[in-house]
Amino acid sequence: MMKPFRKLFPHPALTILMAGVWMLLQPEFSAGMAVFGLILGIIIPIGTARWWPDRPEHIAVGKMLAYCLLVLWDIVVANVQVAWIVLTKPNDRMRPAWVVVPLDLRTPEAISILAGTITLTPGTVSADLSDNGRSLLVHALDAPDPDAVRDDIKHRYERRLKEIFR
Amino acid sequence: MIEIAAILAIAAFLLIGLLFTLVAAIGLLKLADPMTRLHAPTKAGTLGTGAFLMASMIHSFTFTTGALHEILIMAFLFVTAPVSANFISRVNIHRRTCDTPPPPGDGTTWSTLDVPEEDREYRERVG
């Protein structure tokens, strides 16, 4: 029963997302374009399923939205902080540092979102993943205390992502 | 009345965007090494562009029929910006143009620094 459904929709969320993006791209809404968007949303996930075989089983959508708002807020706040650092702090007093973040997340989707969040929030860039995918390498622009950066990432973002991707 | 408020909001968002883009440009010139320099433009991409798109959206909703294309631009930017930042930092690590990062601590190595078994001898000879 489930088998043909999974074959036709390897990623149901992706199907909806692609149809939605296609409709947003149109200058105005029309039924024909909605159908065409849905067709694209069915064909593209099937065509790319080979490179993305698994999918996350449970995603808490409400918590995901709350997480997005939190990240947007953090981007604004941290942007101001980083602008201040760039403008006022002399280069030789800046303390750039590599921060190693041990990961509790295991699904590739969750790790990608965490890495993206770290890069989008100013002051930190996620640079690399360890061979076994269990630690993330983060570069911090000005971190007198690298351990505080690591704890901040783990408590603020990773804990929430663990609740979203259970 | 609404139009005046909208114009003021547009001007405010344009100024905010301008300010952060300027800071990003200054950061690009001022910061000293490749890894810290990477921080400046990735940040302008988020708040600078975000403020410009916000202004554009307010304009389109007050003076013409609104369009939501700006949200798409924002979404695509948020998805692609971390990927390019990640690639640039990997190039930096790979070419040793920055400090070599500390090992992950669980006996493995960073994927960029990993050398395949058969190339290890060659790598040690060349250095």
Image (cartoon, grey):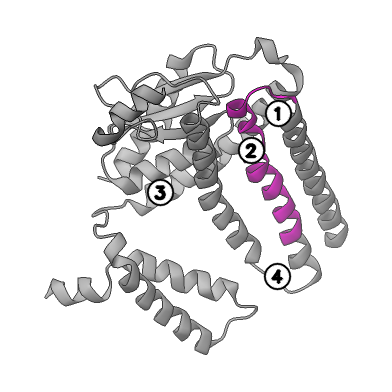
Q: Residue at x 76, y 44 (%)?
A: B17
Q: Which contiguous range is marked in magenta?
A: B30-57
Mark 3 burial class by Cα count in 10 Å: few <14, some 14-19, many 20+:
some
Amino acid carrying label 4: it is: Gly
To which residue does mark 4 refer? B66
Label 1 in the same subunit as label 2: no
Q: Where is residue A45 shown, x and y percent of the image?
A: 34, 70
Residue at the extreme left of the image, as rendered: A1
Q: Can residue A132 be seen here?
A: no
Mark 4: few, some, or many residues within 10 Å (few <14, many ≥20)? some
The residue to which callout 1 is attached is: A83
Q: Are marks 1 and 2 in contact (CB under 8 Å)?
A: yes
Estimate the spatial distance between the alpha carbons at disc 3 and disc 4, rounded to whole Å: 27 Å
Q: Which residue is mark 3?
A: A64
Amino acid type, label 2: Lys
Marks 3 and 2, Cα distance to the nearest angstrom?
23 Å
- Determine which of the numbered discs, if any, sits on residue B43 in the image: 2
Q: Between marks 4 and 1, how big is the CA–CA gap?
A: 32 Å
For label 1, the crowd category at 10 Å Cα-Cα, with few meaning under 14, some 14 to 19 and many 20 or more, is: many
